Image (cartoon, rainbow, N blue to C red):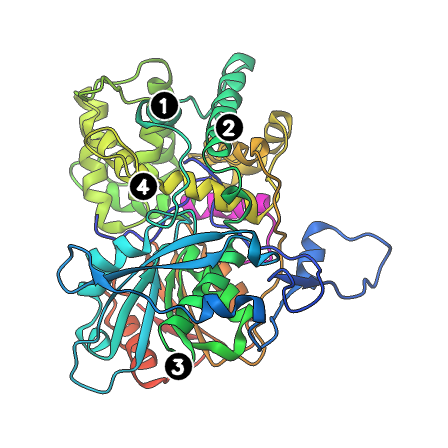
Amino acid sequence: MYTRRTPRSASGSGGLHRRGRAKTAAGLLATAALLVSACSSGGATTSTASAAAEAALIALPEATPAALSSYYGQKPAWRGCGVPGFECATLKAPLDYAEPSSGDVRLALTRKKATGPGKRLGSLLVNPGGPGGSAIGYVQAYAGIGYPAEVRARYDMVAVDPRGVARSEPVRCLDGPDMDTYTQTDATPDDGKETDGLVAAYRTFAEGCGADAPRLLRHVSTVEAARDMDIVRAVLGDEKLNYVGASYGTFLGATYAGLFPDRAGRLVLDGAMDPSLPARRLNLEQTAGFETAFRSFAKDCVRQADCPLGGKGASPERVGENLKAFFAKLDTRPVPTGDADGRRLTESLATTGVIAAMYDEGSWEQLREALTSAMKENEGSGLLALSDGYYERNADGAYSNLMFANAAVNCLDLPASFDTPDEVSRALPEFEKASPVFGKGLAWAALNCAYWPVHATGEPHRIEAKGAAPIVVVGTTRDPATPYRWARALAGQLSSARLLTYEGDGHTAYGRGSSCIDRTINAYLLRGTPPTDGKRCS
């Protein structure tokens, strides 16, 4: 499934943003995400969905276990890191919280100290989502210089790359040329041969990840990343964690609140996720979210003189049919792009490029121009550039580890959406009903975790965080990647949530142009004043 962080960073493979784990264990060193199920009122078995509705993340003991004291007592050696105003450091965390003596994982972090004036409020951790997005890259290139001046004046802006991501022992799966091949694989197979080719691509990707980091791959869950954030909080000298998380970052932040409700400070969860849903349901609802966003794009497109998908008055359905016809044409005749490595615009790359533009309505003009070039001028460089931006492919042909970490976290956090190609085939009508344009491709994309080299350790569950201070949950009504329903669901689970709604398009809301949203969140971060539950902005 396609997934992405908030597009406000500076700058699919894998399932989408997913959940954390729970299993029972005894003692203070118990695995972090403990799930308990309420007694069933019916028979001896319950469905996955109903079990998730009854299971809840249980807080860890307030006292820090003795076996973790050395981690909590670290003193970071801050140093310059080549970015004006920022310092960098490296911390250690236990690879396996159940066996802290079994080895460490190194975590990279950065900070920009509060500039003043005004009393310093502590550290503000930020995470742009993904999973797999670099928090360090995000804070150094955007948040640390682009967040409201009054917020940067009062907080040290801090980011830590989660384990397995970017600068924190990054998982790698394929080199550049192999990743190029992977991203061009036909993701909408029409026969058994093409299905076998897609399965082979998923297997190759998974085997590469397993060969690169066989031990780490078992310990990159969201629960472990949330526990790492508590070590960071303590090392920074903060009694409570103040945090802004976007997209998948909302799941990470909510998990932290569920594990450490007494240490949850001012938490903003923007573009929220629903941790109670199984992977297939998440993928299906995200598919519907992209369809909602595409319909908004389609209505806007036909009002523009340069829309290549239909003239004035054309329905979203007709626009979608025209785009599908273009994709079908690319399936048999890819378009030249002028790429130095000889890549042509395939159906899969074009689809990724279109989906990338759904995250931010500010990209719609670029998408119209790219589609016009590809459809009318037989020149695909514009859509290829959108796809490359989504995958974080550099001009030299190298890829960041975004998509590798994305799959690693997703496939560990939840059992796979599908186990076999036959299961995908049976689900196609449901996915294509959710999105006639993207449904087939997104259903097949959800098969990748079936071939993952390690078993999932997570399950769907509710997060209640009883006893936490007010938490602001933000949802955008036409968000493509984290549908608005998820924000309402998470707000309904968190005991202290305040739901803040942005009525508009695009992925996430803070810092995207709504003065109402920005004023409300700034008041919460600076004065601790949460919005009235249910407040709406446009």
Residue 46, percent from left and from top = 78, 53
Inter-mark Cα distance, 1 to 3:
48 Å
Q: Marks 2 and 4: which is nearer the front?
A: 2
Main SS of the magenta part reads helix
Q: Are marks 2 and 4 in contact (CB under 8 Å)?
A: no
Give the amino acid type for the residue marked by disc 3 in the picture. Answer: Pro
Residue that numbered label 4 is attached to: 356
Dot 1 falls on a residue whose secondary structure is: helix
Which is more toward the observer, 364 or 191?
191
Q: Marks 1 and 3: which is nearer the front?
A: 1
Inter-mark Cα distance, 1 to 2:
13 Å
Q: Which mark is residue 207?
A: 2
Q: Which mark is first along the chain, 1 or 4?
A: 1
Q: Residue at x 42, y 40 (%)?
A: 171
Residue 321, percent from left and from top = 38, 30
Q: Is residue 289 magenta?
A: yes
Q: Which residues are magenta?
A: 275-290
Give the amino acid type for the residue marked by disc 2 in the picture. Answer: Glu
Residue that numbered label 1 is attached to: 178
Residue that numbered label 3 is attached to: 530
Camera sees residue 251: no
Inter-mark Cα distance, 4 to 1:
22 Å
